[in-house]
Image (cartoon, rainbow, N blue to C red):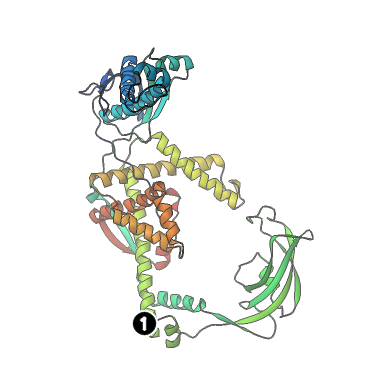
C-alpha cells in the first residue's frame, strides 16, 4: 500500500517582513501580555536565517522578571500558611526569602514558554518541530538571573515549514490501470476455494506428495536436541514447502508406525543464526498417513460455502474479484498520483523532518536485515549505497507529506470524530474478544490516535485530488494489475 508520511503537518503561514508592526523580529523590542498583570518587554535578535533554519536570541529584563516574581508572591499571600503567622498575614519579604528561588524558577520557565510562543506567532512562521530552547550553561550567570541581578537570556532554535505553491490539481493527468474479471479468474478462484476445503482420510500404504502425515519428531544438532526442534502429533502435508528443504521429501514413502532419521541442513539465510547453514538430524515417528479428498465443485459444495447454488457461488466470487481489482487499481492510481505530486513540487525541506523520517526508515531496514540474518552484501549493495537510497526516499516522503497537508489545509479537509471512531472500531474488530482492551489503549494513548488520524487524512486528500484530476482508463491483464509495486519509494 502506498504510504506518505502519516503525520498531518500544518502548512506555513505567508512570510512577513523581518520587522513586524509590533516590533518582533530583527533586533527590536516586543511586548508580551497574557493572563498575568505585568506586560513583559524583550529584546529579540535574529542571529541565524539560513534557508529554513532560524535562531533567535531573546533577552528579558531582570526588572520584568522581578515584577513577575512580586506579582506571584502577592497572589500567594492570601493562601500560604506558615507557622508563626496568621493566615493571609505572611509578609511578602518573608515569602520571598522562603520561596523566592522556587517561584523565580517557575516565573522563568513560564516566561520562556510564553515568549517563545509569542515570538513565533508574531513572526508568522510555523516551526517544523518543537523549537529548541537553550539557556546559559554558566551556573554563575543563572544564579545572578535567579537573584534578579541579571537579565534572562536564551536562544531559540527552530526550522520553519517552507512555502508551498500547490500545482493546479485539475491539470494533473493520470492513467488508471483496470482489468476485467474473466471466466478464467472465477475458475481459478473457485479452484482455490476447493483447495482450501480439502479434507484428509487415513489410507493404507506409503505416503506420497500431497498426502498428509501426522508425526512426532525430535531434531538434534551434534547429537543434542535444539530449541524449537521437537513436536508431537504434527500434521504435515508433503510437498507444500512448510518445512526446511529435504524434510518433506524425506518422508515420501513412509508408512504409519515407521520411524525415520532425516539428515537435513538448515538454509544459510535461516532466521535463527545458531541453526543457519547447520546440519541436523530429525528422528521422526509416523503416526498416520492420509490422502487428500478434494470436494466436487457442485451445488452441494456451494451450499457448504453458504450459497444456494454453484452459479450463485460463481457470482459471489466474481463480485469479490471485481472488488479486489478495484482496490488494486486505486492503489496503482494513487502511486501515479504521488509520483505526479512529487515531480510537480520542488521546495526546501526542513532538515530535522527529513532526518527523523530517515532514522525511522533506517531502523526498519536494519531490523529487517537482522531478522533475515542478512547483510547489505547479501542484498547486492553496500551500507553507503543503501543510505543514499533511503535518504532519497525520506526526502520524497517528507515532500509528499507536506504537499498533501497543504492541499488538505487549503481545502478545509479534516478527519471527523466519527471517521476516527470508525477506524478505531475497525481496529478493535481485528481482535475478537479483546475489543475493550483496544478501546482502552486508544483512550489512554493520544499518540496512537494521531497515528490513526494520519492515514485517514491522507486518503481523504488523495480522493479529493482524484476528483479534480484528468483520469483515463487503461485496460491491462489481471496479472499485471495484481503485481506488487515496490513500495520503497513511497
Is 235 left or right of 11, judged from the image as shown?
right
Position of 137 relative to 341 (above/below) = above
Is 383 left or right of 76, judged from the image as shown?
right
Foreground of the two, 420 or 305: 420
Position of 172 relative to 33 (above/below) = below
Place of residue 196 in the rendered image (x, y in percent of width and height, measured from the top left):
51, 76
Q: Which residue is mark 1?
A: 312
Foreground of the two, 18 or 150: 150
Q: Residue at x 61, y 77 (%)?
A: 210
Secondary structure under the numbered disc 1 in the rendered image: helix
Q: Is residue 238 visible?
A: no
Q: If the image is split into quadrants, where does the N terminus sit?
A: bottom left
Place of residue 158 in the rendered image (x, y in percent of width and height, measured from the top left):
37, 30
Residue 190 position by quadrant: bottom left
In this view, the residue farthest toward the top is: 149
Foreground of the two, 314 or 102: 102
Position of 419 relative to 146 (above/below) = below
Place of residue 360 in the rendered image (x, y in percent of width and height, measured from the top left):
47, 43
Q: Residue at x 52, y 43 (%)?
A: 386
Foreground of the two, 360 or 29: 29
Q: Residue at x 27, y 30 (%)?
A: 121
Position of 172 relative to 196 (above/below) = above
Q: Residues within 10 Å of mark 1 (few under 14, many from 20)?
A: some
Amino acid at each position: 500500500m502506498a504510504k506518505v508520511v502519516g503525520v498531518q503537518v500544518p502548512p506555513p503561514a505567508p512570510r512577513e517582513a523581518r520587522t513586524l508592526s509590533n516590533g518582533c523580529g530583527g533586533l527590536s523590542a516586543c511586548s508580551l501580555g497574557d493572563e498575568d498583570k505585568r506586560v513583559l518587554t524583550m529584546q529579540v535578535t535574529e542571529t541565524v536565517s539560513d534557508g529554513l533554519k532560524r535562531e533567535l536570541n531573546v533577552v528579558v529584563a531582570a526588572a520584568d522578571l522581578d515584577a513577575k516574581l512580586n506579582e506571584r508572591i502577592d497572589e500567594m499571600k492570601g493562601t500560604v500558611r506558615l507557622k508563626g503567622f496568621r493566615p493571609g498575614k505572611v509578609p511578602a519579604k518573608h515569602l520571598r526569602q522562603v520561596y523566592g528561588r522556587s517561584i523565580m524558577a517557575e516565573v522563568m520557565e513560564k516566561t520562556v514558554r510564553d515568549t517563545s510562543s509569542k515570538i513565533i506567532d508574531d513572526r508568522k512562521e510555523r516551526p517544523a518541530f518543537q523549537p529548541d530552547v537553550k539557556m546559559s550553561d554558566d551556573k554563575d550567570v543563572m544564579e545572578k538571573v535567579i537573584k534578579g541581578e541579571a537579565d534572562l537570556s536564551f536562544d531559540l532554535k527552530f526550522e520553519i515549514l517552507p512555502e508551498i505553491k500547490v500545482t493546479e490539481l485539475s491539470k494533473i493527468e493520470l492513467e488508471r490501470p483496470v482489468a476485467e474479471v474473466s471466466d478464467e479468474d472465477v475458475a481459478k478462484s473457485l479452484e482455490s476455494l476447493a483447495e482450501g476445503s480439502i479434507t484428509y482420510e487415513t489410507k493404507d500404504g506409503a505416503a506420497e506428495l500431497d498426502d498428509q502425515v501426522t508425526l512426532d519428531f525430535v531434531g538434534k544438532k551434534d547429537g543434542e536436541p535444539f530449541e524449537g526442534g521437537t513436536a508431537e502429533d504434527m500434521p504435515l502435508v508433503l510437498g507444500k514447502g512448510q518445512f526446511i528443504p529435504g524434510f518433506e521429501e524425506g518422508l515420501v514413502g513412509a508408512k504409519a508406525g515407521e520411524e525415520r532419521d532425516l539428515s537435513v541442513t538448515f538454509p544459510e539465510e535461516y532466521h535463527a543464526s545458531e541453526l543457519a547453514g547447520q546440519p541436523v538430524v530429525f528422528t521422526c515417528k509416523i503416526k498416520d498417513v492420509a490422502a487428500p479428498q478434494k470436494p466436487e465443485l457442485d451445488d452441494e459444495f456451494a451450499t457448504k460455502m453458504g450459497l444456494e447454488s454453484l452459479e450463485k457461488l460463481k457470482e459471489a466470487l466474481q463480485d469479490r474479484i471485481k472488488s479486489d481489482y478495484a482496490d488494486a487499481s486505486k492503489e496503482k492510481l494513487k502511486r501515479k498520483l504521488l509520483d505526479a505530486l512529487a515531480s510537480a513540487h520542488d521546495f526546501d525541506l526542513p532538515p530535522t523532518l527529513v532526518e527523523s523520517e530517515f532514522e525511522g526508515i533506517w531502523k526498519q531496514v536494519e531490523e529487517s536485515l537482522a531478522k533475515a540474518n542478512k547483510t547489505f552484501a547479501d542484498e547486492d549493495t553496500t551500507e553507503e549505497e543503501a543510505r543514499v537510497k533511503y535518504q532519497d526516499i525520506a526526502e520524497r516522503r517528507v515532500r509528499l507529506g507536506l504537499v498533501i497537508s497543504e492541499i488538505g489545509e487549503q481545502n478545509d479537509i479534516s478527519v471527523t470524530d466519527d471517521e476516527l471512531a470508525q477506524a478505531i472500531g475497525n481496529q478493535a474488530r481485528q481482535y475478537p474478544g479483546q475489543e475493550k482492551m483496544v478501546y482502552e489503549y486508544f483512550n489512554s494513548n493520544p499518540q496512537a490516535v494521531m497515528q490513526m488520524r494520519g492515514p485517514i487524512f491522507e486518503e481523504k486528500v488523495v480522493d479529493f485530488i482524484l476528483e479534480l484530476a484528468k483520469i483515463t482508463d487503461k485496460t491491462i491483464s489481471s496479472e499485471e494489475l495484481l503485481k506488487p509495486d515496490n513500495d520503497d519509494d513511497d
